[in-house]
Amino acid sequence: MAIKVIDHGSDDYKQMIALRQLLLRKPLGLNFSDDELAEEESDILIGCFDEDKLEGCCLLTESAPGVLRLRQMAVISGLQGKGVGRAILQFAENIARDRGYKKMVMHARKTATGFYEKLGYTIMSEEFIEVSIPHYLMEKDL
């Protein structure tokens, strides 16, 4: 397993779009727009690979000075619960710290809040609906 920062527009990025589409968007009947994908050019794109096959990913978007927002966290179904998501998140937190960020925030799907709580994140909001499913604002000081 190798975790690395991915370049926007690269072949690895194309794998990342396909994985996020399959796991996060397709089940909700949604697709990425060209504008959404273009906006990711300034994000920190992170992928976890076995050989050249993408197994999981996430994006980090600056939401305020010193604050990064974790977005689009996805791990292929057969590997969920096997430490891949934890490894990706720890890598993301290390990148954030190395770049001087002090806090990580996210809109976590309700079904994933337990995973994030185990890794030190705190629910900071009431439940809200985003992309048609329940979410919570969560955060962690880095």
Image (cartoon, helix red, strand yellow):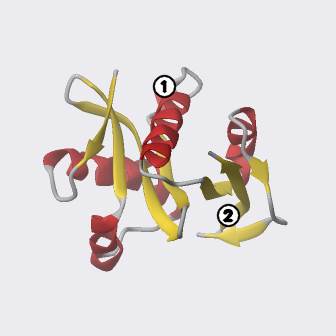
Is the residue 22 above or below the residue 2 in the image?
Answer: below
At a point 31% along the width and 79% down the height, the residue shown is 35
Point out residue 71 in the picture as x, y percentages from the top left corner: 50, 57
Residue that label 2 marks = 133
At a point 47% along the width and 48% down the height, the residue shown is 96
Identified by mark 2, the residue type is: Ile
The residue nearer to you, when weighing 39 against 67, is 67
Query: Can residue 29 be spotted in the picture?
Result: yes
Is the residue 4 above or below the residue 10 in the image?
Answer: above
Identified by mark 1, the residue type is: Leu
Residue furthest bottom as drawn:
35
The residue nearer to you, when weighing 22 against 124, is 124
Residue that label 1 marks = 79
User: Disc 1 to disc 2, how far (Cα)?
Assistant: 23 Å
Point out residue 33 in the picture as x, y percentages from the top left corner: 33, 75
Which class describes the residues within 10 Å of circle 1: few (<14), some (14-19), or many (20+)?
few
Which class describes the residues within 10 Å of circle 2: few (<14), some (14-19), or many (20+)?
few
The quarter of the picture where the N terminus appears is top left
At a point 47% along the width and 66% down the height, the residue shown is 62
Secondary structure of residue under mark 2: strand
At a point 72% along the width and 38% down the height, the residue shown is 120
Q: Earlier in the sequence, mark 1 or mark 2?
A: 1
Point out residue 63 in the picture as x, y percentages from the top left corner: 53, 70
- Is residue 141 left or right of 77 when viewed as pictured? right
- Is residue 119 left or right of 75 when viewed as pictured? right
Number of labels in the image equals 2
Residue furthest front as drawn:
100
